[in-house]
Amino acid sequence: MKLKLIYPKWPKLPNQPEFHLPPHGPVCFAAAVPDSVDLEFCDEHVDSLNLDDSPDLVGISAMLTCQMPRAWEIADAYRARNIPVIMGGIGTMLHAEESQEHADSVFLGEAEGHMETVIADLASGSLKQVYDFMRDHPDIELVGPARRSILNRERYNFRGMQMVDLIHASRGCRYACYPCCTEYLGGRNFRPRPIDAVVAELEGIDNDRFFFVDNSLAQDDQWEKDLFRAIAPLKKKWISHPIKDDDEILDLAAEAGCWYVYQAVFDTSDTIRNRIKRLQERGIGVEGTVLLGLDDHDEDGIKRLVDFLMEIELDLAEFTVLTPFKHTRARAELEQAGRILHNDWKRYTAGEVVYQPALMSPEKLAEMYQYAWDTFYGNGGKELKMAKLFLNVMRKQKADGTYKRPSLSRSRTW
C-alpha cells in the first residue's frame, strides 16, 4: 500500500525572513504508520507537489488555520480522481467539520496506537468518515522517535545554515491562556515523556541544535530539572518555549545548553524586565513573543511596549496580532460580542486584523503592528539580530569543544 503524506504551504508573514523549519507533525504521524506501508512525503514549502500521481491513500497533515484552504484544495484535487484522502493535524482538529466536506476521512487526535486500524479499514474498504481520538490520548510511552528520515534535510536551511530539528518532551499543557487552543487540542493534563526516551531520540538526531516545541517546559519543577540534567552531557544547544523562572532551573538550563527561549512579553512590568534579565545574565537569549490588540491596548500603549522592548535590549521580538482561532476563549468572547470581521481562514495568519479591536480601528491596529516591526528592527533587520544569536551559540560550542567549522561538504546549522 502506498501512502502519500502532504504538508501544504501557507502564506508567510511579510515582516519575517523566509525560512522553513522541518515540520514536526508529519514526522510524528509517520512514526505511527506501520512499516508495511510505503510512505512518500511532500512538504510543499520545499518540494514540488505532483497532483497527477495515484497513491492508494493521500494523507494531509495541517498545523495552521491559514494552511487549511490549501489543504482542502489539495484534497479536492485528489478526490476528483477517486483517490481517497484522510486529513489530520492541529489545523484539521480545529476545522474538523469543514474538513469533512473535503476529505473521505478525518483523523482527530494523536496518531500513536491508532494508525494500524485506519490502514486496515482502508484495505477492507471500510474507511470511517471520522476517527475521533481527541480525548483518547495514547499512553505517552507509545510516543517513540519521530520519523525524520522522510525529510529532505538539505532543503531545510537558511542561507546555507541547517535549521534546528524539532522534538517534544511532553504533551498537554496545564495552562489555559486566553488566545491559545492547546487546552482543546491536547488537554490540560501535563503528559511528560520518559526522560530516557527523550535523551535517546536526541542522541539519534544528526544535528547539534534543536527546538523543544513543548507548549511550556515550566509545568513540573522536578521533571524540568531532571530533563536538563539528563540532556546536559549531550552538549547540544537548544531553543524552547518558557522555562521556569527559578535560580536552580535557570542554571541547569544554561548548563544543559539552552541557546534561547521564547518568552511572552505582555506588559512593561518589572516582572517581565527581571525575567528577561535573569535569562540573559546566564547567556540565554530571549525572543519575545509580543501579542498586540488585546482589549487594553491602545496606540500609546503599544508604543510604550515597543520602547520597553528596546530599553531592555530584547534579543529578538516576534510581533503578532491577536487572532481569534477556533476553540479558544478569545474566539468565544469576540464571537459573542459580534466582533469577528470575517472567517477568511487564509488571512488568519496572526499578521492581519480579523476582528474589531476595543480601543482602535482595525486599520489603526494594522498600522501599529507594522510600527512595532519597523521600530524594533529599525537599527538593523531581523536577520542581523538572528546573526547575533548565531554568533552566541558558536561561542558556546567553542567553549565546550563541540563547534564544527562549516565546510563546503557540510551545511552550517542555524
Image: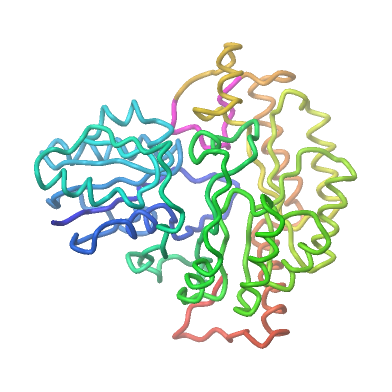
Name the spot of residue 301 as percent of width and height, x first: 82, 31
| Residue interval drawn in magenta | 344-355
Which quadrant is the N terminus positioned in? bottom left
Name the spot of residue 181 as percent of width and height, x first: 54, 35
Q: Residue at x 73, y 52 (%)?
A: 377
Asked whether residue 351 is drawn in magenta, I would say yes
How many numbered circles does the render carry?
0
Name the spot of residue 320 as percent of width and height, x first: 63, 39
Q: Residue at x 55, y 36 (%)?
A: 183
* Coloration mode: rainbow
232 or 398, nearer to the observer: 232
Asked whether residue 36 is drawn in magenta, I would say no
73 shown above or below 212: above
User: How would you classify the magenta stretch by its main secondary structure?
Assistant: loop
Q: Residue at x 40, y 66 (%)?
A: 155
Name the spot of residue 23 as percent of width and height, x first: 43, 56
Q: Quadrant of residue 84?
A: top left
Q: Residue at x 63, y 35 (%)?
A: 176
58 shown above or below 145: above
Seen in the image, is 214 located left or right of residue 378?
left
Which quadrant is the C terminus positioned in? bottom right
